[in-house]
Amino acid sequence: MENETDLKNALAVFAHYGFRKASMDDLAQAFGVSRQTLYNRFKTKEAVRDWAVEGFSRHMVARAAAELENDKATTADCLLQAFGRWKGDHIALLRSAPHGAEIIEIATEALKSIEDSPLAAFEQQIVRFLMKRKACANRKRAEDIAHTLDIASKGLMVTAESPDAFAAGMKRVINALLD
């Protein structure tokens, strides 16, 4: 139980039932293991949640960071693709699940308590990318842009009706910030 599918399945259970109503039985079924196996591994539902949030976030940061390595794409296109992997790819899950917004809130809170948070790591990768591409005059400007992009992506994740709407919104933000 360490692959991306297991992580996503756990989050899908929480998004479907809500954290309070999701049971260890529901989670065990999503993993294809017994409830006892799940209890032996995690002990509590909170531990499953924290594992899933952190693990899935780390997978998504790695995917997003890979988009920043495309030397053939423009700076704006790299950023658009990176934020698409980081947040846009999950719009359908969040929109189709009754408790999708709750999962965003829970994930954000859980990630704040992690010492080497994937959120902070991704923001720093954006800063390094912007500096490498010489898209900003100085580090402070790169940090401000990275932070603004992160905040905008969170808002669009909640309000966008589809991945395409998320991408369109992020494109507007990216173009406004890079002009």
Image: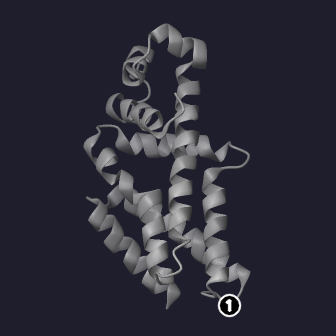
Asked if one can make out residue 43 in the rendered structure from this viewpoint, the answer is no
Q: State whether residue 169 is above or below residue 33.
A: below
The residue tagged with tag 1: helix, strand or loop?
loop
Identify which residue is drawn at 67% across, 73% down.
Answer: 128
- Tell me: 147 left or right of 90: right
Which residue occupies 56% across, 71% down? Answer: 69
In the rendered image, residue 162, in percent from the top left (x then y), is placed at 26, 59
Estimate the x, y position of residue 111 in percent, counting from the top left.
Answer: 61, 45
Query: Which amino acid type corresponds to the residue marked 1 in the rendered image?
Result: Ala
At 45% from the left and 32% from the top, the residue drawn is 6
Of residues 67 and 151, the one nearer the viewer is 67
Q: Is residue 13 among what the camera can see?
A: yes
Rendered view: 134 above or below 29: below
Taking depth in this image into account, of 44 and 73 the one nearest to the observer is 73
Quarter holding residue 12: top left
Specify whether 168 is left or right of 174.
left
Q: Position of residue 89 (x, y in %)?
A: 37, 55
Residue ID for mark 1: 137
